[in-house]
């Protein structure tokens, strides 16, 4: 029987990164970039105003006071028509290009109109707006009362953010909202990225019914299917629901064959040694090579892993998770999530967040396997060892005991009592 580390190593050795593909920006969030991206422009592409105000010559306002003639009004998206010369300025809006002759911008709040009006020119009813109609006209003269402006004040110079040819994003970077914006700014409507893995989820068992149904005698609702589909989505992959299959060779083989069309197949239940645990045999008949069966871990010992295909025709990784819900959850966290991470180009260490924590109470552990026990990890000072409390938990079928957990406490194999205050490893869960 393999240890957790040995089993994970086998999984990762079988996992290949998906080929890169062009993905629309709208679908690229959460993917890993597969190329270096260089800018095709200077940004900003011109010297631009960072505030609403007046573009001036700093030399005209030596003592911080001046009255200047207003040449024009420059809106964002417009181009200045006039050059600022001695004794003049141009009214300018945030983001608009700085006119020739100006070397500073004075904020609107530091100015006042000398001519006491800025009239609204009428728009003739029934006509289209003509030049100058239906808008506020700029003042003809403005008074400035401010500290003496310095050249470059409130101006963002051309190319300050980036220059044409600069590499702005490197291959291997996770695409977040900021990266989406950066790609758009440098003219990329698509990103060359590692696509999401498609992960099929199949629940097995004659006792299972859908969540919306009332179970009859000897039946239970299928909690594993929805839980694993959600876990797949949270891990950044694309879930595919194959529903429930009865423990009958014909229907089960058909569903398994359907699942082998995807990048990963997760089968919940049917992988132990019972009479109706048909999954391993049917997978072998479908050409899936067993890599290992059973792991030294609690819960989740019967876990099965195999693969079909190769680098030429493509591959499908197959995980047979035990039917008890906490066993399925732990198996997903320990083995499926790292496989999804590697296939999508992410660092596997981003999935396993093992850290030390301090037990808040005594805890007695018995068993010959390491146990991943639900715990409540308390947040504290960033530099301090956090505290963790073992939760009430009745075993691998007790999903309620897992709901309040934000970590799994890793109790090593052996019979012993861990004292309150003792340091132990925990694996932090996604929240």
Image (cartoon, grey):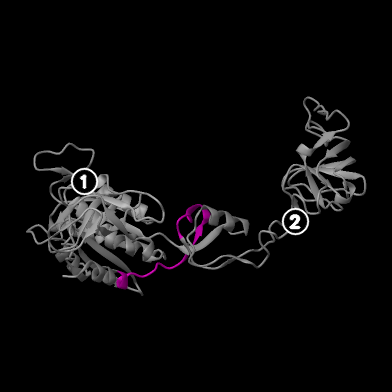
User: Split into 4 quadrants, where in the image is the N terminus?
Assistant: bottom left
The one of 197 and 429 positioned closer to us in this rendering: 429
Mark 1, residues whose alpha carbon is within 10 Å: few (<14), some, or many (≥20)? some
Pointer 2 or 1: first along the chain = 2
Quarter of the view holding residue 271: bottom left
**Residue at figure coordinates x 19%, y 46% from the top left:** 392
Q: Does the magenta stretch include residue 19?
A: yes
Badge 2 element: loop
Badge 1 element: helix
Give the percent coordinates (x, y) of residue 400.
Answer: 21, 43
The residue lying furthest to the right in this view is 86
Residue 375 to residue 347: above or below: above
Mark 2, residues whose alpha carbon is within 10 Å: few (<14), some, or many (≥20)? some
Q: Name the residue under label 2.
A: 46
Q: Name the residue under label 1.
A: 401
Give the percent coordinates (x, y) of residue 331.
Answer: 24, 59
Residue 237 to residue 171: above or below: above
Q: Is residue 337 magenta?
A: no
Which of the two discs, 2 and 1, sits closer to the camera?
1
In this rendering, does residue 263 appear at all? no
**Residue at figure coordinates x 36%, y 52% from the top left:** 234
The answer to whether mark 2 and mark 1 are in CB contact below 8 A is no
Residue 34 to residue 205: above or below: below
**Residue at figure coordinates x 32%, y 49% from the top left:** 230
The one of 16 and 311 positioned closer to us in this rendering: 16
Direction from residue 371 to residue 21 in the image, left or right: right
Give the percent coordinates (x, y) of residue 91.
Answer: 81, 41
Q: Give, as a single range, the part of the protein colored magenta.
A: 12-31
């Amino acid at each position: 029987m393999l240890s957790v580390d040995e089993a994970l190593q086998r999984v990762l050795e079988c996992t290949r990164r998906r080929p890169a593909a062009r993905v629309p920006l709208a679908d690229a969030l959460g993917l890993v970039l597969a190329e270096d991206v260089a800018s095709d422009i200077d940004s900003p592409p011109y010297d631009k105003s960072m505030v609403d105000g007046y573009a001036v010559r700093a030399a005209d306002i030596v003592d911080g006071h001046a009255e200047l003639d207003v040449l024009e009004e420059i809106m964002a998206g417009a181009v200045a028509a006039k050059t600022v010369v001695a004794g003049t300025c141009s009214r300018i809006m945030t983001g608009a290009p700085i006119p020739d002759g100006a070397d500073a911008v004075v904020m609107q709040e530091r100015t006042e109109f000398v001519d006491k009006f800025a009239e609204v020119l009428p728009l003739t009813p029934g006509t289209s707006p003509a030049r100058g109609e239906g808008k506020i006209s700029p003042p003809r003269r403005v008074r400035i009362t401010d500290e003496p402006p310095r050249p470059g004040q409130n101006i963002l110079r051309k190319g300050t953010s980036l220059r044409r040819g600069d590499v702005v994003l490197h291959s291997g970077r996770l695409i977040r909202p900021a990266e989406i914006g950066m790609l758009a700014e440098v003219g990329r409507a698509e990103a060359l990225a590692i696509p999401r893995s498609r992960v099929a989820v199949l629940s097995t068992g004659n006792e299972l019914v859908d969540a919306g149904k009332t179970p009859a005698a000897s039946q239970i609702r299928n909690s594993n299917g929805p839980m694993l589909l959600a876990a797949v989505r949270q891990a950044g992959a694309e879930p595919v629901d194959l529903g429930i299959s009865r423990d009958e060779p014909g229907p089960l083989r058909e569903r398994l064959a359907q699942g082998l069309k995807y990048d990963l197949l997760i089968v919940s239940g049917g992988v132990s040694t019972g009479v109706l645990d048909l999954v391993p045999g049917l997978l072998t008949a479908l050409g899936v090579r067993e890599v290992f069966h059973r792991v030294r871990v609690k819960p989740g010992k019967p876990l099965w892993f195999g693969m079909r295909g190769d680098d030429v025709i493509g591959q499908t990784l197959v995980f047979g998770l035990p039917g008890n819900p906490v066993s399925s959850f732990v198996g997903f966290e320990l083995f499926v999530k790292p496989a999804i991470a590697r296939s999508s180009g992410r660092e596997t260490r981003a999935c396993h967040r093992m850290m030390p924590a301090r037990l808040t109470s005594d805890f007695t552990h018995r068993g010959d396997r390491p146990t991943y026990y639900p715990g409540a990890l308390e947040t504290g000072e960033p530099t301090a060892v956090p505290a963790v409390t073992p939760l009430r938990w009745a075993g691998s079928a007790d999903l309620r005991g897992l709901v309040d957990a934000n970590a799994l406490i890793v109790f090593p194999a052996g019979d012993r009592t861990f004292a309150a205050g003792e340091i132990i490893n925990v694996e932090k869960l996604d929240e």
